[in-house]
Image (tube, grey):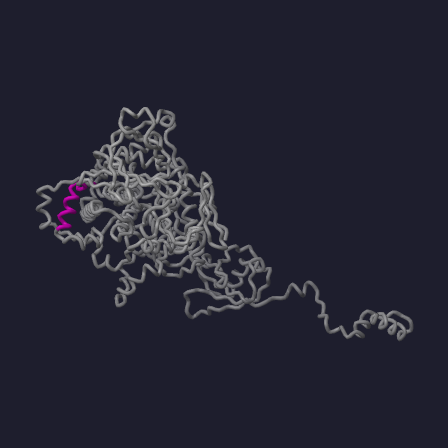
């Protein structure tokens, strides 16, 4: 109404003509609210200032640079403008922009600043993608090399392994030591000095380390440096494939041979887990394989650990894997010495004897001699025993699968633990068929109904052996509705134990004795028992006084406290009688094989809280199963096999892992000792490794790995 009155008043004042639009706005007092209109050309020319930091080594050059940019400028153009303004002549091809606030690289040079969301307040650093990093290898040697800080960790580890000549890089990853594992060391090393520079192996001049593409041949069987299968030393005719000089041969020897033993003082300074909670700290620091080092807060010259993360060692070959076998042996050795994995006194002496033998051969010049055909055959036989296959891996021979499945039938002793009374031991007639054990009162009643039938698929099989005491037991933990049913079987001799133990191990994985790996498993068990079965010779009895041995270097501190030095020396020499004829590489392989035979082998521990539970439990992640473990007692509660897994996912908002198995079994848990992404990656990683086959090319399906492990946060 008021506007109409104003309009009528204006019309009357203008002699009956409608007022102009500007006059109306002027009358209303609204002319100041509209800015001056500009053309599209003028609008497009508007620029804004972007502050950039150049990370270069020239101290006298200006680090801070300010450029006038527009939102439609692509990252490649920004690089060009910056380099032109710096006016420093050098190779800038390895440089890229790092966005400090968002912790990300701007690697897509065709993207515009607007597409990335870069505005005037962004802090961009123009820095090299390859930086120096210190890596502590499983043999405790530290190497210094250039690594890509912009590539995903999975790709960075692949490049590192090419530099170190380690095949199957997918089995390794980078580990950041957690604060819990460093506390003890910090207290003891308060006044100690940093290790000398000479202790660090500098590989910064390697082609890959310099940011150049690696020779693809380093990863193929035809161009990989060939090693002596007995001594593990690089063959002189192929040393040039690894690099370009005598220094490289020295580096190869350092990585492929065990050069020194540890001292008791060194052991005392290192972190030794005492409980399952302590062991969980060891696995909390694995880096995310789907993100770069820079994105995970790793800085230049930082010390990380390079370790075998996945306990699935595929296609070990001493002709090409001397470095890999040695580093694997060293990781197993330190796990035994630091008691990261439990073993019996008898087993500890076997490990000590093998270490002593390896250390003797490594120091001997005789290991550099030409190979012996018989020894090579022994190594090949040991390799076939070593192969760890997952469900879903190589299938056994079709002809074997269609034949009748063999069975075992024997008199065995059944031991059932009772809560308030002594163990009940009784002899029954046992029949092992498919993946089940049935037992009867006697052989004559085997045609009728069994007393009980035990399905071993998915069970835990634990050896209970003392060769000296002629004790050959098999402990079976069979999953039931309310936990695990515990059953002990007692065998009469080594041969019987090896056959039944091998059948139980295969049955727990869902395989039968018709599988081609059954006989290999039997031979592996017999070989391990043979190493334990030693007798003290008169020569060995007189040797302790004459042998220059530091037994404390070969056993864990627990046994150093239990026995005197002379006693340990005598017992190690006694056990050494059975391994003294082995070649260097064979001794390492036997050590790895014995490590794999331990009940706790391959378990990585995490503290979790299961959905619906009021207390914390420990989750053991292995190459073929997940295991729920009572945190107080260490007893397994339930086991779930990957072969029975239907799907798994992560609720990233509440950080909860949910897994579905066959027969409508589902679990969910949150991880308390580490990020749930680590467990998610472990599960996906093991499933990825189960897809490997010798029939395929050696190139990895990196995209599949990231699909299985990456997650969607």
Q: Residue furthest front?
A: 420
Q: Nearer the viewer, residue 460 or 514?
A: 460
Q: Which quadrant does the N terminus fall into?
A: bottom right
Looking at the image, which residue is at 63% across and 66% down?
Answer: 46
Residue 414: quarter of image: top left
Q: How many marks?
A: 0
Is 481 on the left-hand or right-hand side of 198?
Answer: right
Q: Is residue 571 magenta?
A: yes
Q: Is residue 151 visible?
A: yes
Relative vertical location of residue 26 with respect to residue 558 in this rendering, above or below: below
Q: Nearer the viewer, residue 129 or 354?
A: 354
Is 168 on the left-hand or right-hand side of 257?
Answer: right
Relative vertical location of residue 699 with respect to residue 50 in this rendering, above or below: above
Is 551 on the left-hand or right-hand side of 8?
Answer: left
Q: Nearer the viewer, residue 54 or 681?
A: 681
Residue 351: x and y, percent?
22, 46
Q: Is residue 580 magenta?
A: yes
Residue 552: x and y, percent?
18, 54
Residue 145: quarter of image: bottom left
Q: Is residue 581 visible?
A: no
Residue 355: x and y, percent?
21, 47
Residue 684: x and y, percent?
43, 46
Magenta: main secondary structure: helix
Is 284 on the left-hand or right-hand side of 42?
Answer: left
Q: Which residues lie in the magenta part?
A: 567-582
Q: Residue furthest right?
A: 15
């Amino acid at each position: 109404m008021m506007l109409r009155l104003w309009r009528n008043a204006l019309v009357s004042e203008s002699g009956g003509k409608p007022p102009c639009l500007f006059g109306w706005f002027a009358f209303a007092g609204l002319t100041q609210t509209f800015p001056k209109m500009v053309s599209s050309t003028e609008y497009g020319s508007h620029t804004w200032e972007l502050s950039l930091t150049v990370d270069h080594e020239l101290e006298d050059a200006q680090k801070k640079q300010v450029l006038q940019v527009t939102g439609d400028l692509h990252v490649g153009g920004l690089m060009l403008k910056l380099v032109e303004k710096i006016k420093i002549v050098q190779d800038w091809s390895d440089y890229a922009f790092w966005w400090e606030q968002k912790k990300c690289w701007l690697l897509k040079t065709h993207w515009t600043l607007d597409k990335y969301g870069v505005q005037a307040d962004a802090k961009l650093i123009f820095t090299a993608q390859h930086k120096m990093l210190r890596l502590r290898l499983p043999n405790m040697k530290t190497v210094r090399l250039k690594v890509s800080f912009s590539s995903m960790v999975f790709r960075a580890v692949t490049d590192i392994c090419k530099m170190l000549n380690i095949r199957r890089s997918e089995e390794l990853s980078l580990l950041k030591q957690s604060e819990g594992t460093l506390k003890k060391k910090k207290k003891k090393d308060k006044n100690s000095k940093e290790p000398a520079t000479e202790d660090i192996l500098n590989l910064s001049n390697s082609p890959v380390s310099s940011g150049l593409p690696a020779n693809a041949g380093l990863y193929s069987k035809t161009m990989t440096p060939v090693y002596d299968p007995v001594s593990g030393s690089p063959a002189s005719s192929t040393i040039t494939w690894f690099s370009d000089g005598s220094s490289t041969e020295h580096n190869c020897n350092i990585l492929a041979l065990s050069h020194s033993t540890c001292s008791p003082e060194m052991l005392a300074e290192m972190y030794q887990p005492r409980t399952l909670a302590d062991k969980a700290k060891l696995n909390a620091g694995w880096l995310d394989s789907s993100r770069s080092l820079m994105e995970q807060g790793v800085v230049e010259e930082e010390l990380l650990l390079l370790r075998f993360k996945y306990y699935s060692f595929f296609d070990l070959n001493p002709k090409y894997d001397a470095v890999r076998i040695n580093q694997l042996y060293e990781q197993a050795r330190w796990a035994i010495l630091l008691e990261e994995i439990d073993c019996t006194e008898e087993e500890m002496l076997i490990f000590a004897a093998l270490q002593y033998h390896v250390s003797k051969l490594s120091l001997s010049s005789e290991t550099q001699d030409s190979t012996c055909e018989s020894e090579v055959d022994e190594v090949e036989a040991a390799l076939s025993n070593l192969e760890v296959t997952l469900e879903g891996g190589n299938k056994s021979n079709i002809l074997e699968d269609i034949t009748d499945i063999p069975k075992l039938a024997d008199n065995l002793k059944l031991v059932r633990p009772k809560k308030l009374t002594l163990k009940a031991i009784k002899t029954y007639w046992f029949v092992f068929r498919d993946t089940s054990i049935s037992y009867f009162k006697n052989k004559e009643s085997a045609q009728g109904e069994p007393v009980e039938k035990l399905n071993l698929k998915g069970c835990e099989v634990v050896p209970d052996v003392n060769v000296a005491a002629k004790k050959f037991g098999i402990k079976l933990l069979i999953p039931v509705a309310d936990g695990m049913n515990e059953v002990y079987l007692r065998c009469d001799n080594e041969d019987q134990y090896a056959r039944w133990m091998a059948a139980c191990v295969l049955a727990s994985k869902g395989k039968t004795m018709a599988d081609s790996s059954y006989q290999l498993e039997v031979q592996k068990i017999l070989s391990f028992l043979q190493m334990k079965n030693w007798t003290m010779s008169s020569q060995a009895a007189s040797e302790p006084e004459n042998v220059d041995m530091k037994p404390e270097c070969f056993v864990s501190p627990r046994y150093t406290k239990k026995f005197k030095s002379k006693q340990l020396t005598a017992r190690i020499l006694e056990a050494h009688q059975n391994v003294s004829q082995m070649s260097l590489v064979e001794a390492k392989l036997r050590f790895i094989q014995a490590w794999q035979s331990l009940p706790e082998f391959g378990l990585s521990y995490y503290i979790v809280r299961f959905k619906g539970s009021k207390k914390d439990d420990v989750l053991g992640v292995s190459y073929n199963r997940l295991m729920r473990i009572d945190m107080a007692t260490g007893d397994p509660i339930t086991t779930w096999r990957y072969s029975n897994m239907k799907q798994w996912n992560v609720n990233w908002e509440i950080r909860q892992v949910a897994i579905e198995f066959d027969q409508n079994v589902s679990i969910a848990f949150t991880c308390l000792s580490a990020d749930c992404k680590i467990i998610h990656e472990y599960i996906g990683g093991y499933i990825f490794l189960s897809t490997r086959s010798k029939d395929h090319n050696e190139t990895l399906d990196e995209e599949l790995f990231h699909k299985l492990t990456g997650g969607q946060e």
